[in-house]
Amino acid sequence: MLEIANLHAGYGAIPVLNDVSLRVGAGEFVAIVGPNGAGKTTLFKTISGIVRPTRGAIRFEGADLASVPAHARARLGIAHVPEGRQVFPSMTILENLEMGAYAPAGRRVWRENVERIYGWFPLLKERSSALAGSLSGGQQQMLAVARGLASAPRLLMLDEPSMGLSPAVADEIFERIVAIRAETKLTVLLVEQRVAEALHFADRGYVVEAGRVVLEGTHETLQKDDRVRQAYLGM
């Protein structure tokens, strides 16, 4: 579904990604882990069109994304749930979900999709008329994920969904994501600081350090790798 080859990207004269290559197959759950500042968020921004690559290629379902602007990538079925949640605080929960459904695919299935979303996140239904800014951090993260799902995406990209949350709330977010993926067979690409949980639930993973992919493999392979165990799993 998603193929990235020899990708270089950064901000002005500051390089961040260096020769990154990875792939995500349809229906897969792929995790990208690594230290802060490794380039994981920049990678997501480059996939979604916010950052322009200096070299390399990104293909989504066979289409070259080089000339596709960010808003059009969303219409292709790429949903990017950014780090820090970034909900619209002065809009209601329902209005935030409606904003997520602006893409044609989201509008076509809005009525049935919003009911499925409410089934996955009952609190959002109970408080659908509440302002997003009145929600707790964990509730805002649920809303951010739900807003991404409202677009009826083919690829859901989640950037640090556990950031700033207590372990218990982060566990709940993870459980919801895993349950949704199991029910829908949605393709998920996850950047996550909770390495043990990310690798446990993912089919495959990539370790990114200093803007480069340094390890890749199935979750079993990475969990057994001494470098991963020492650097990220505390073993």
Image: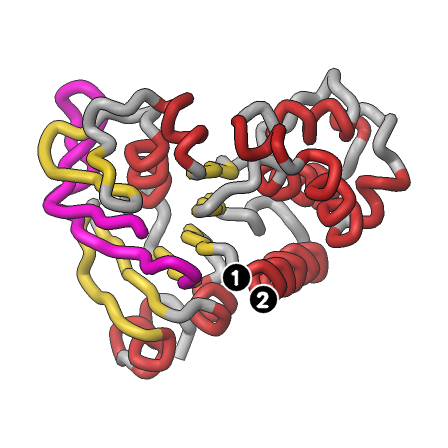
* Spot occupied by residue 69 in the image (x, y as percentages of width and height): 32, 21
Q: Which residue: 62% across, 64% down?
A: 183
Q: Which residue lies furthest to the right in this view?
A: 126
| Residue denoted by label 2 | 182
Would residue 32 be counted in the magenta stretch?
no
Identify the colour scheme used.
secondary structure
* Spot occupied by residue 226 in the image (x, y as percentages of width and height): 27, 80
| Residue denoted by label 1 | 185
Would residue 7 be counted in the magenta stretch?
yes
> Amino acid under label 2?
Ala
Q: Which residue: 58% across, 28% down?
A: 86
Q: Residue furthest front?
A: 108
> Amino acid under label 1?
Lys
Q: Which residue: 39% across, 79% down?
A: 235
Q: Within 10 Å of the Cα at label 2, are there few (<14), some (14-19), or many (20+) other Cα atoms?
A: few
Say if mark 2 contacts mark 1, CB within 8 Å: yes
Q: Distance between the residues labelled 2 and 1?
A: 6 Å
Q: Residue 39 carries which label?
A: none
Residue 177 versus residue 143 in the image, above or below? below
Which of the two residues, 234 or 124, is positioned nearer the viewer here? 124
* Spot occupied by residue 137 in the image (x, y as percentages of width and height): 70, 40
Splitting the image into 4 quarters, where does residue 58 fall?
top left
Q: Within 10 Å of the Cα at label 1, are there few (<14), some (14-19), or many (20+) other Cα atoms?
A: some
